[in-house]
DNA sequence: CACAATACTTCGTGATACGATGTATTACGA
DNA sequence: TCGTAATACATCGTATCACGAAGTATTGTG
């Protein structure tokens, strides 16, 4: 997918990836892979941004001797996902503007 | 609309705005306003980018003593619009990932 | 012991949207 | 006629951001 196209979707995507159960970096990347590839550096940037915006919380836990950071969506995070559905309507109207056919096939 | 969300759509939007007839900066902004607000500085940046990518050509013309730059979509520009429709499918699948309901309402 | 996979982190860079500001002309009301 | 808004394009600086590169550390696995 186009680099720019991803921008607005990335944050909500990550929120969506943890909305049903807490998850950690590596797992999130795996889960999102079929829909959108993203690098580790990108993901951790996003996670920090979402944490700063209080859309998720972090909890460190040991798993097999290795440290893992589990990310948990907050109420504000869920609200953000609902807001996205509203924004989506604007995107759709924009899509229709872009793909409208007038004298395209004349 | 969310700033980030617009990113990927902006370029194709501008192409879509001139696809049926040549247009100029001020007019493009007016045409797009109902769908997406964008500032002049943003538009001219985009127009230059699209010109560099040869997705449109520019032609200067005088209109009422004032200089106007008319932008004309190229074949490559139309191709870009068609490509967008394909990319859109990926966006839709991403949208479905984001808004999927699992144990959301439990 | 070497090497891949897991897991997280930091740094630097290039792309980009946009506000602010500037220039120049036309149109129009006071 | 004077000022102001609208039209039209341009430039600069800034903040945001995705990402590649590289690094640290641990757990398997051959």
Image: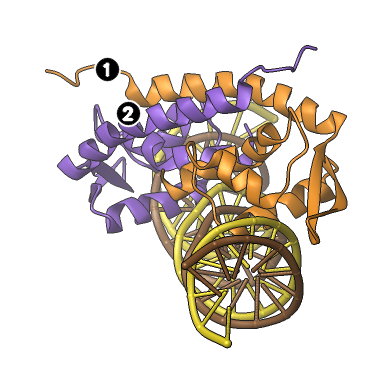
Chain colours: A orange, B purple, C yellow, D brown
Residue A73, given in percent of the width and then of the height, sits at 81, 35
The subunit carrying tag 2 is B
**What is the secondary structure assignment of the residue under circle 2?**
helix
What is the spatial separation of the Cα atoms under label 1 and label 2, in whole angstroms?
A: 13 Å
Q: Is residue A32 left or right of residue C21?
A: left
The reply to whether label 1 and label 2 mark residues of one chain is no
Quarter of the image for residue A16 reads top right
**What is the secondary structure assignment of the residue under circle 1?**
loop
- Residue occupying the point 66% across, 41% down: A11
Q: Where residue A101 is drawn, which disc sits there?
A: 1
- Residue occupying the point 24% across, 30% down: B21
Q: Where residue A16 is drawn, which disc sits there?
A: none
Residue C26, given in percent of the width and then of the height, sits at 40, 40
User: Where does label 2 land, which residue?
Assistant: B85
In the depicted structure, whether residue A22 falls above or below residue A68: above
Residue B25, given in percent of the width and then of the height, sits at 40, 42
- Residue occupying the point 32% across, 51% down: B50
> Nearest the camera: B35 or D6?
B35
In the depicted structure, whether residue A29 falls above or below residue D25: above
Q: Is residue B85 left or right of residue A88?
A: left
Mark 1 crowdedness (10 Å alpha carbons): few <14, some 14-19, many ≥20: few
The subunit carrying tag 1 is A
- Residue occupying the point 80% across, 59% down: A67
């Amino acid at each position: 997918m186009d680099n720019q196209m991803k921008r607005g979707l990335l944050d909500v995507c990550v929120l969506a990836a943890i909305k049903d159960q807490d998850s950690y970096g590596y797992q999130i990347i795996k889960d999102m892979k079929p829909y959108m590839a993203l690098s580790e550096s990108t993901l951790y940037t996003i996670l920090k941004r979402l944490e700063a915006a209080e859309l998720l919380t972090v909890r460190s836990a040991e798993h097999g001797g290795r440290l893992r950071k589990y990310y948990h969506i907050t109420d504000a995070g869920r609200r953000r996902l609902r807001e996205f559905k509203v924004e989506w309507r604007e995107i759709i109207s924009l899509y229709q503007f872009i793909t409208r056919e007038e004298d395209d096939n004349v």
